[in-house]
Amino acid sequence: MKRALALAVFAFLFLYTGFSTKTAAVAQDEAIASRSAEVDGAKLHYMTAGHGTPLILLHGYGSNGDDLISLAPYWADVLPETEFVSPNAPFACEENPFGGFQWFGFRDRSPEMILGGTRAAATRSARNAPAWNEANHGAPP
């Protein structure tokens, strides 16, 4: 068990070192920017990187947009004509009040609640996309 744990820690540190080296070498045109947009009277925070066709990255439960946008420099190599947009979910996370967000509540984990929450989050994100685009480029898509 200790050997497996040590191997896992070593693998994590090895991968982390490789990622942080790449991040430090990111060119200025791949810079990550913090932005906000107002949608339905609510101010939403999101991060962007790159230029081109928008690709919206939606984080998981208890995370935030900062987590996924850090992957943009790696994906930019294979998706060079892409603008990565990584918004925070609209609600503070019930289980992670230290900067985590959620798209919908997760205390009731019934299949109906999860499906309903997922559909509502997809609808909300699709409705917010034009506002993110307009805030970045000055015109709706």
Image: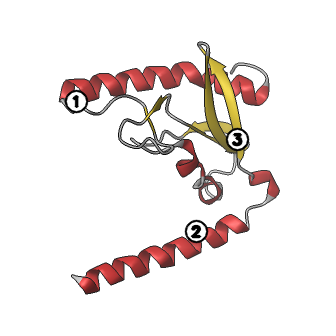
Q: Residues within 10 Å of mark 2 (few under 14, many from 20)?
A: some
x, y percent for residue 46: 62, 36
Kind of residue at badge 2:
Phe
Direction from residue 132 to residue 136 in the image, left or right: right
Q: Secondary structure at mark 2?
A: helix
| Relative image position of residue 94 (x, y in whole percent) | 37, 35
Residue named by callout 1: 108
Q: How many marks?
A: 3
Residue behind mark 2: 19
Residue at point 47%, 42% (across, down): 100
In the picture of the structure, the residue carrying the numbered disc 3 is: 34
Q: Residue furthest bottom?
A: 3
- Considering only order in the chain, which callout, 1 or 2, is on the residue closer to the N terminus? 2
Between the residue at mark 1 and the residue at mark 3, the CA separation in whole angstroms equals 32 Å
Closer to the camera in the image, 102 or 24: 102
Callout 3: SS: strand
What residue type is disc 1 on?
Asp
Q: Residue furthest top?
A: 40
- Residue 26, position as x, y percentages in the image: 73, 62
Q: Tell me which colouring the rendered structure shows.
A: secondary structure
Question: Which quadrant: the C terminus?
Answer: top right
Q: Amino acid at mark 3?
A: Ser
Q: Earlier in the sequence, mark 1 or mark 3?
A: 3
Give the camera-side residue of 37 and 15: 37
